């Protein structure tokens, strides 16, 4: 497997994240986990488009280059047509050696999580944490692990990780959970999600901050 650095290389419009994503912003993927450098964040909208590519890009491709399109996929743009934030997915080997000049930070201490900006508009800030592990989590998730969502910005404590598999299960609910919901809406009382891995049975709880 490879370690991945996912970095903003250019912005070809106006990023509507607050504060906006800018060239040089990055996160790392290590053995199925996402890690964000100290003080950093990832736009949730962009992350949802990136997620399907990351597990495949972590792995060796045995097919010939004329038989597999993934060889040539190194860039992805944010879904926002006004922002057009361009991300590059760069591989590094698991021992930290570089491929194409990229450095890996997966094995290093990325420091502590800085507090997010105090102003998040009218949207609720959320914390999504591991409430229980009712099986054997292959990612090593433990009760108390968490990420936070402030406006459209997703934060993970630096030096910590969060399983991509579990993250993908929670993401579709989060935009609605940030907003006021009408009485009778089923999502108003839905505050728990289970990881898709049936061996792990990791229970995530979504709570407003």
Image (cartoon, helix red, strand yellow):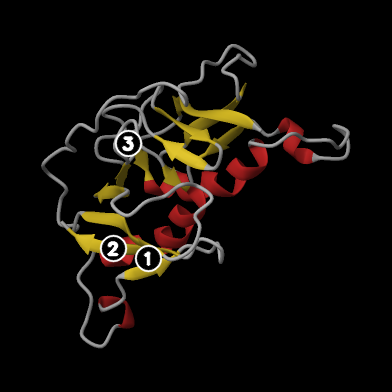
Residue 81: numbered disc: none
Place of residue 20 in the rendered image (x, y in percent of width and height, measured from the top left): 30, 34
Q: Is residue 109 above or below residue 19?
A: above
Q: Residue furthest top?
A: 101
- From the image, tell me which residue sits under label 3: 41
Element at label 2:
strand
Q: Residue furthest bottom?
A: 184
**Quarter that holds the C terminus:** bottom left
Q: CA distance from mark 2 to mark 1?
A: 9 Å
Place of residue 48 in the rendered image (x, y in percent of width and height, measured from the top left): 48, 50
Q: Badge 3 local density, few (<14 within 10 Å), some, or many (20+)?
A: many
- From the image, tell me which residue sits under label 2: 206
State yes or no: discs 2 and 1 in contact (Cβ < 8 Å).
Answer: yes
Q: Nearer the viewer, residue 148 or 17?
A: 148
- From the image, tell me which residue sits under label 1: 173
Residue at 43%, 66% in the rendered image: 134
Q: Nearer the viewer, residue 42 or 34?
A: 34
């Amino acid at each position: 497997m490879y370690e991945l650095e996912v970095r903003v290389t250019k912005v070809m419009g106006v990023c509507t994240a607050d504060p906006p994503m800018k060239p040089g912003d990055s996160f790392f993927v290590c053995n199925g986990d996402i890690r964000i450098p100290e003080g950093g964040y990832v736009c949730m909208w962009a992350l949802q488009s990136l997620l399907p590519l990351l597990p495949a890009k972590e792995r060796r491709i045995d097919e010939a280059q004329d038989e597999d399109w993934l060889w040539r996929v190194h860039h992805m743009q944010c879904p926002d047509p006004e922002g057009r934030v361009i991300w590059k997915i760069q591989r590094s080997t698991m021992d930290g050696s570089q491929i194409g000049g990229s450095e890996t930070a997966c094995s290093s201490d990325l420091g502590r999580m800085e507090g997010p900006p105090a102003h998040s508009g009218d949207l609720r800030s959320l914390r999504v944490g591991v409430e229980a592990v009712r099986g054997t989590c292959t990612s090593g998730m433990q009760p108390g692990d968490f990420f936070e969502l402030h406006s459209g910005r997703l934060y993970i404590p630096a030096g910590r990780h969060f399983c991509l598999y579990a993250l993908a299960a929670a993401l579709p609910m989060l935009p609605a959970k940030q907003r006021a919901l009408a009485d009778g809406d089923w999502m108003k009382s839905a505050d728990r999600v289970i990881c898709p891995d049936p061996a792990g049975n990791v229970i995530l709880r979504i709570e407003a901050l």
